[in-house]
Image (tube, rainbow, N blue to C red):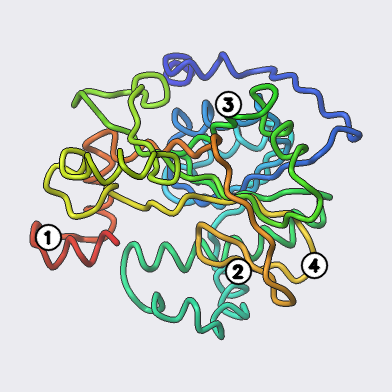
Amino acid sequence: GRSASSHGISLYRGWSFDTDTAITPKICITGSTSASLHQILPWLYYHKVIGVSHFILFVEGDAAKPAVTSVLESIRGVKIIHRTKELKEQQDRSRIWNETWLSGFFYKPCNYELFVKQSLNMEMAIVMAREAGMDWIIHLDTDELIHPAGAREYSLRRLLLDVPDNVDMVIFPNYESSVERDDIKDPFTEVSMFKKNYDHLPKDTYFGLYKEATRGNPNYFLTYGNGKSAARVQEHMRPNGAHRWHNYMKTPNEIKLEEAAILHYTYTKFSDLTSRRDRCGCKPTKEDVKRCFI
């Protein structure tokens, strides 16, 4: 009641989107989240507006609370999957456990465990997306927004509609947020500055200003730098980690977009770090930081 309206959640009641079954392509986002409703709703709304019709969300923590899931499940096109004992038993029989490409992440804590869990969830989402008649599937976290720059209109649907038929996978390079304040409450509206991916930078700019950009960090980004991808839903698909898709029968034909990107709102609040620390039992030592953060 009171807390919902104070977060502006009442603004999202009675959403009306064109759900004509003739609209193509049909795009599905899948993700694993423990975020609050205050974070998930604007994320959902934004992606609905740019053309995503289906969401398959694997929920834990705050996202799995009845007050949150009841709102999410009332939104057309949103499917919620709880991490139940039955789900875990089903995933324990997954063929992914026999895959050598993922074995280096098995039986390790925190971020490694999350990476395996995401891959298992993605495998299930592929089946669900095929059954729902989806054309494209994208794995996305709730601190990321797709930025469909370069399309004839600001639309992910328009962007993917223009992709040649022989392309199986589209790579979106990621940009990482540059946070200028320590009191961010709503990252999607308050964070406005991003470090561009090196794929979208002139090489002389990237290498010429590398020291200034990294500010002593050996990595260009604080987190990942290999982008995310959208894949055509087809037979024999499998996840290839949380950022890519693959196919058991062929090597996917992929293209990398020159303008469109993933906007990654990385650690925009101090609680983003402390929640990871608390979830993984991290101590303030270099060894534990390496254990808890890939």
> Which residue in the structure is indicated by mark 3?
46
Residue 241 locus on image (x, y percent): 51, 65
User: Could you tell which of marks 2 and 1 lies nearer the N-terminus?
Assistant: 2
> Which residue in the structure is indicated by mark 1?
283
Q: Is residue 283 left or right of residue 18?
A: left
Q: Element under label 4?
A: loop
Query: Is 101 in front, or is 112?
Result: 101
User: Could you tell which of marks 4 and 3 lies nearer the N-terminus?
Assistant: 3
Whole-Å distance between the Cαs marked 4 and 1? 44 Å
The amino acid beneath tag 3 is Tyr
Asked if the residue under mark 1 is in contact with the one under mark 2, i.e. CB atoms within 8 Å, the reply is: no
> Which residue in the structure is indicated by mark 4?
235
- Give the residue furthest to the left: 285
Residue 260 locus on image (x, y percent): 55, 36
Q: Is residue 24 above or below residue 49?
A: below
**Residue at point 65% right, 57% down?**
254
Q: Is residue 85 left or right of residue 200?
A: right
Q: Residues within 10 Å of mark 3 (few under 14, many from 20)?
A: some
> Which residue in the structure is indicated by mark 2?
86
Q: Element under label 3?
A: helix
